[in-house]
Image (cartoon, rainbow, N blue to C red):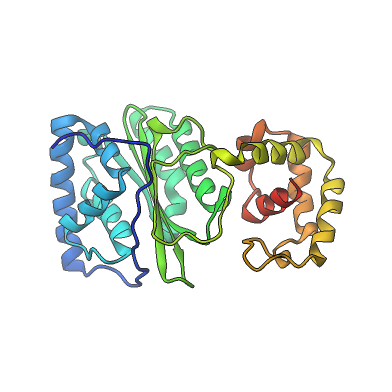
Amino acid sequence: MPPVPHANRTGYASPPLHWGKAPRWLFQRMVRLAREMTLAIVEDQGPEAMLGRLSEPAWFQAFGCVLGFDWHSSGVTTTACGALKEGLRGLEKEAGLYVAGGKGAVSRKTPSEITLAGEALGQDLSNLVYASRMAAKVDSSALQDGYQVYHHSFFFTVSGKWAVVQQGMNEESGYARRYHWLGERVASFVEEPHSAVCCDSTGAVLNLVASESRESRQTIAHIATEERPEAVIADLHPLETVTLPHRHHVAAEDIRPEHLARTLAATYEQKPAGFEGVLAMPGVGAKTLRALSLVA
């Protein structure tokens, strides 16, 4: 199997949003096949080769189909990742490949799962915990495209290489969007970090990680760390009475200046370095970034 090329391109997919879960008999078969396919790739080309494939949207989609899941469903993402995690359970050291996270509440256990793996390996994997958190925060807050992220799978090797597959849902459109990351291609967490974003439905987007948003990021970082919080809040209050265009992603009712005061006080006092530092701070989420974007 030849290596998967990584051109600078965006892949597209349009998985309809489906509820429910795979039948137990099917999932058990997927687990066995995912394990054997992965071990074959790892033996032939090493665990990093598997990371490259998982970060490529077309290959990942084909992987889920070969495992036997419905090709026409958002569930191929969550089920394929879950089957791979279960298939490698107990074989992580042998394969040199670990899987953390998953769907819903399981996704929030990703940092602790990475930390436990590090303890077993005798390694400090705090950098991978940071990578996981930043990937999740970028796709839920810095990239606001109408899709609520509900699935986060973090794949990593003993050598510290990593990849992320996460998925968001838009109940109104009835579609899902899948986000792919490959650590070795991430020069910056906050500027064009994705290997692909897969969906056929775009719509209005606040994309603070686009290269075109560089000046906005710089301005947001300045506002959050150098401007006194009360001055920023004063700029936000008039927006409560502004009627924004219908096509605009941010509505005036989304802005509640009084709710931002505590977060802005923290950013002003701690003065994190640059936009990435602001984004990484606890409490800085989608609403904070929308408000700061409007002021910027």
Q: Nearer the viewer, residue 190 or 26?
A: 190
On the question of residue 153 being in view, the answer is no
- Residue 181 location (% of width, % of height): 40, 41
Residue 112 placement: quadrant: top left
Q: In the image, 140: left or right of 239?
A: left
Quadrant of the rendering where the C terminus is positioned: top right
- Residue at (18, 35) in percent of width and height: 42
- Residue 294 location (% of width, % of height): 72, 52
- Residue at (43, 38) in percent of width and height: 115
Q: Nearer the viewer, residue 76 or 212?
A: 212
Q: Is residue 257 above or below residue 211?
A: below
On the question of residue 39 being in view, the answer is yes
Q: Is residue 223 above or below residue 141?
A: above
- Residue 66 location (% of width, % of height): 16, 55
- Residue at (72, 67) in percent of width and height: 253
Q: Is residue 133 above or below residue 79?
A: above
